[in-house]
Amino acid sequence: MPAPALRELQGAFWRHLAGAPGDGTGRPIAPALQQVLVGSEALPAAARLAIYERMYFWRLLDVLREDHPRTAAVLGDDAFRTLVQAYLGRHPSEHPSVANVGRALAPFLAANPPADAPPWTADLARLEWARREVFDAADAPALGLDTLRALAPERWPETRFAVVPALTRLVVGWPVQRAWAAAPDDTAIVLPAERTALRIWRSGFAVYHAAMSAREEAALASIIAGAPFAVVCDAFADLPEEQAAAEAAALLVAWVEDGMVCSLDPERRGR
Amino acid sequence: MSASFPYLGHGVGLRTKHYPDVLSGTASPDWFEVVSENFMIRGGRPLAVLERARAVAPVVLHGVSLSLGAVDPPSASYLDALAALAERVEPAWVSDHLCWGSFGGHYAHDLLPLPYTEEALELVVDHVSRVQDRLRRRILVENVSSYVAFRHSTMPEWEFLAGVAERADCGILLDVNNVWVSAHNHGFSPEAYVDALPPARIGQFHLAGHQDHGTHLLDTHDHPVPEAVWRLYRHAVARFGPVSSLVEWDDDVPELDRLLAEAELARTAEAEVLGARARSA
């Protein structure tokens, strides 16, 4: 049998590593690979190939665990490992940076829930992935409270505020922020099934998340859509007018204090 | 080549554990090596740390996903990202590995071994040339640790590496630990490897620790540089003269002081070898 061309060799090697990721315990070696591997008495060819199998799987298992520490703790070592084996088999890395290998883990977990896993596990993974994405999102200088205070009262209604790029929103089916905050060894977490809207953002180098009320969720959606502050106040339309304006302003101050707002643009008035 | 790959002294890898040292301004190695892919991001702490690092010392970009030996050419989008990062960071040089790590658009995130054949040599030379054309600079190509060899290889690794450097007109990042590990795993002489490389192409040394698994050595970067690797480093310095060196320590990363002390050992060893060489000249 002639030696395989490079494409054939690499294809066989790749499929061996990635086809059924795991510990490298004696899976069959394709003939194209088998015929050209050099072994020794101390270390036969299959054992040499198994070193690569283990390195491939363990490295990616470590990365996925680092990016989803709470999810891994909730599932436990064995179930998380089984999940990762199945995930990598279906979703091998498509990006040069290993940091992106977990991009599809939460949806995969939702579609393939492990037996005995809490029903909110995939939502917890979504929160962890959202935090990871915010971690290295683009920078933008946050607006200071002084700038807000310097804005003349009559200009507030028409002013539009922009949020920092390192902000995302997530709607999940359980209050998974409680599971996220639980001690890693707390395996008895019980969450009620309730729609939960979260904002996840970075201030400085630190990543935060917080649950939002329905009013805050609507107000933040308005801000992100580029609406002027007067429209943002619509989120409080069920309240008396003065109270609505006061609560909307208080919310905006809280967002500014959290470092979520990066600019205001009164000049866009009338556009 | 010296103009392309200046002598920077004895550096350390920039690792997350040492970010606080960099941000506080207490880290001042001769130079930093950073993993390119970790900084192909839009913002946040890593890029801020990188900016602080380059304010105190030269920075070098060391990639792990260029996949120079893959059958498909390096990804255009990856090269764009690398070029943009290089423009931002202004590294002293850019390096990656003599291996493959991707296939069919998927990445192994590992440094996989090549057969040392004329087919593979031509392919790697073509890919290095494409990268250098895109980056408009010569790069350094590093030998990797390996655990398998291929029956149909027609030349030893050192001949392949030298061939890549000569034909593609690139430099060599000689990882002394990888030579030691692969020599042990495949039964060749590490000194013969070093002696076969063209001195004019050597732009950098890597030093690192490994684990002895009995049947093989595993390149783990989680230990101090062992004595055997220091001996081979001395052999390399005697042959190649002063070359920038870097201690890699990626797992169980020690405090920065411990890492810097390891870099100082490289400085001392280099001075001793070069001093002895000067006296005997």
Image (spheres, coloured by chain):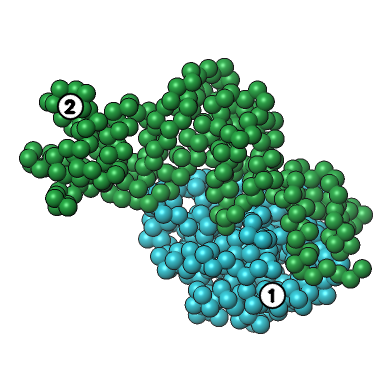
Chain colours: A green, B cyan
Residue plotted at (52% across, 60% down): B36
Q: Is residue B135 visible?
A: yes
- Disc number placed over residue B134 in the picture, else none: none
Chain on which label 2 sits: A
Percent across and percent down for residue B236 are 67, 70
Percent across and percent down for residue A263 are 23, 48
Chain on which label 1 sits: B
Percent across and percent down for residue A214 are 32, 27
> Quick one: A7 or A97, which is closer to the camera?
A7
Residue plotted at (47% across, 42% down): A132
The amino acid type, in three-letter code, at marker 2 is Ala
The amino acid type, in three-letter code, at marker 1 is Leu
* Residue B24, placed above or below residue B274: above
Residue B169 in which image quadrant: bottom right
Q: Of the residues tagged 2 and 1, which is closer to the observer?
A: 2
> Quick one: A239 or B154, which is closer to the camera?
A239
Residue A198 in which image quadrant: top left
- In the displayed structure, does residue A199 sit left or right of residue A6? left
Q: Is residue B201 visible?
A: no
Percent across and percent down for residue B194 are 72, 72
- Disc number placed over residue B123 in the picture, else none: 1
Residue at the spot of label 2: A244
**What is the secondary structure assignment of the residue under circle 1?**
helix
Residue plotted at (39% across, 57% down): B51
Q: In 3D space, how far apart are the residues under numbered discs 2 and 1 (Cα atoms)?
A: 67 Å
* Residue B38, placed above or below residue A162: below
Q: Residues within 10 Å of mark 1 (few under 14, many from 20)?
A: many
- In the displayed structure, does residue B236 sit left or right of residue B54? right
